[in-house]
Amino acid sequence: MLFYALKRLIYVLPVAFGVSVVCFLLVHITPGDPLTAVLPVDASAELQAQMRAIYGFDKPLPVQYVIWLGKVLTGDLGTSIATGRAVLTEVSRAVGNTLILSAVATIIGFFLGCLFGFVAGYYRDSAMDRLASTLSVLGVSVPHYWLGMVMVIIFSVQLNWLPATGAGPGGSAEWAWDWDHIRHLILPAVTMSVIPMGVIARTVRALVAEILSQDFILALAAKGLTDRGIFIHVVKNAAPTALAVMGLQLGYLLGGSILIETVFSWPGTGFLLNAAIFQRDLPLLQGTILVLAMFFVLLNLLVDVMQTALDPRIQRG
Amino acid sequence: MTGTAAPIIDIRDLTVTFIGGRKPVHAVNGVTLAIQPAEVLALLGESGSGKSVTLRSLLGLHPPGRTSIGGSIQVAGKDVMALSGRALADFRGKTVSMIFQEPLLALDPVYTVGAQIAETIQRHEAVSRVKARARALALLQKVRIPSPERRLDAFPHEMSGGMRQRAMIALALACNPQILLADEPTTALDATVQIQILLLLRELQRELGLTVILVTHDIGVAVEVADRVAVMYAGRIVETGPVREIIRNPRHPYTQGLLASRAHGAMTGSRLDAIPGSPPDLADLPPGCSFAPRCKHAKATCVETAPEIRSVTADHWMRCMLDAEAAE
């Protein structure tokens, strides 16, 4: 088990290398020089060359990459052009906020998804199944930014129960686990949870139906297990796949929450990416994407290792 | 073997109809069977003859919403059809247990073999985890699995087919049941492994005094382990008697056809004598004898009226009217 985890960890290295190359090249593929955004339009060629030398853009690409990678490995992601603050500071604060939002959304989605999935799978083709299946299809098909706006209209504008934007009182971007902050979390987290809820519900429904149709369920009944005893076996058989889907969903939410974070002005990575793109803040963009991509790689690793621990058939496969 | 003692299994006029589909499917149509303690009965028949359905009825394993069951089943003094919920679960695995055709599918893939056996023991008896595990090990030794200590923590997919079936038998015997139901226990195995499993079953049956119902489509298997054979066709028992008697003196045309279609004993180069046609549609059974459309001796009366059960000798019974006419 430990050996497998280590082996799997080594497989991460080439992927991480690929990710870093793509992130680095991003700046150089995009049209326009990163400096054009900060320099005045009428800057002299001399000044431009001087600035290029300062930022290291005058050296050949492979050299620039090695220098950049060296800095990244020591935790230096560069300086944001727009704010002048270290990219690492900006990104890590945003990552923290996004992590809170995504994790809470995934947990809500996982519990509701499993609930709907098990009900639908156990009572196939009943009214309960149709209700649960409809909810899960709605969950994956309704555009979540639209749902977010509807939630804001109902709960913030009409009922005035919950704040519509920000992560804390007075637009603070520092998170704390108190009611003033949690109030801000509810609407975006619930809106975001609809996606994993739908995906997990549909996966679990199919899983449960498939497991229940297998011979060993009959054999478990034949050896005297009660419905509750059999349910535990069903859960244990469904868990590896359900958890894998949950992990992947968390990964998607970590990187793909630009729309929801923008709707709710949640100061996370999506919001940061959005700002970086519109301000042409390339170091910030580069750093954010790199951190998000690495997150995804590590999350996949975690899911893989967890699945192996839960399902004995995978390791040998 | 058919003594005068009270039967441990007493099935009277059992009918099982599946009502989920478009047309009701009459899988079992009036099975009456009495089995004595420590008797081994082989339920012989082709696919769809209702043998497995009869077997599952003994454990009340048919989903209640989609099946309608008639008749009565008494097992070890209990009325199985009256049992439900907790009482039925207590009965399953404790009084009667079952082994299945394909052990790889019948064992839970994500639990170790030892855990599955221990779970059964702890379900029916108040014993500690450690003690249940020790008993699981003893059971694996009893079914002669090589290096049983290691197999205790093995998953089903890590074992061979024969070993898995041994583990399945150990699981079935975990709570010392009186009755063992075996649903085609050797069909999924290699020929060499088949005979080992059959010998093991026979040996355990003698040692533990088990009553066994063995479902099979293979006459060879029936001869190997059974005392008595009941031949099923279209949800009815068409002939029953001691295994030697049935082999030597089959009276029902279907049993005769089955015996004639065996490769065993046939001349090399000669064509095997197959029964023409195919079994009837269980959703649309003929009014008379269900074998009549395939029977080479069939007469007009066979198609019109269903034959009654008749005695050939004291313990040899069958359901055909032709033989009566021929004999008289």
Image (tube, rainbow, N blue to C red):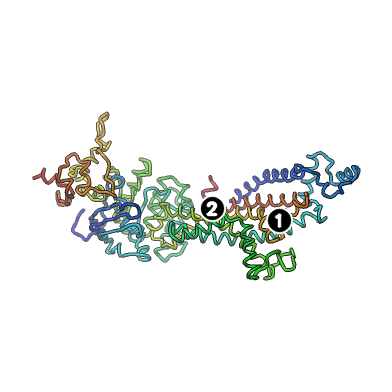
Instruction: List x then y, in percent, for residue A162.
Output: 65, 69
Kindly identify which residue carries mark 2.
A241
Q: Position of residue A114 (x, y in %)?
A: 53, 59
Count neighbours of disc 1 (C-alpha within 10 A) and say few if under 14, some if 14 to 19, many if 20 or more: many
Image vertical order of residue A99 relative to residue B275, above or below:
below
Q: Is residue B163 visible?
A: yes
The residue that disc 1 covers is A269
Q: Quadrant of residue B19?
A: bottom left
User: Label 1 lies in what chain?
Assistant: A
Q: Give the side of residue A5 with respect to residue A90, left or right.
A: left
The residue at 69%/43% (across/down) is A18
Q: Are marks 2 and 1 on the same chain?
A: yes
Identify the secondary structure beneath mark 1. helix
Under tag 2, what secondary structure? helix
Disc tally is: 2
Chain bearing tag 2 is: A
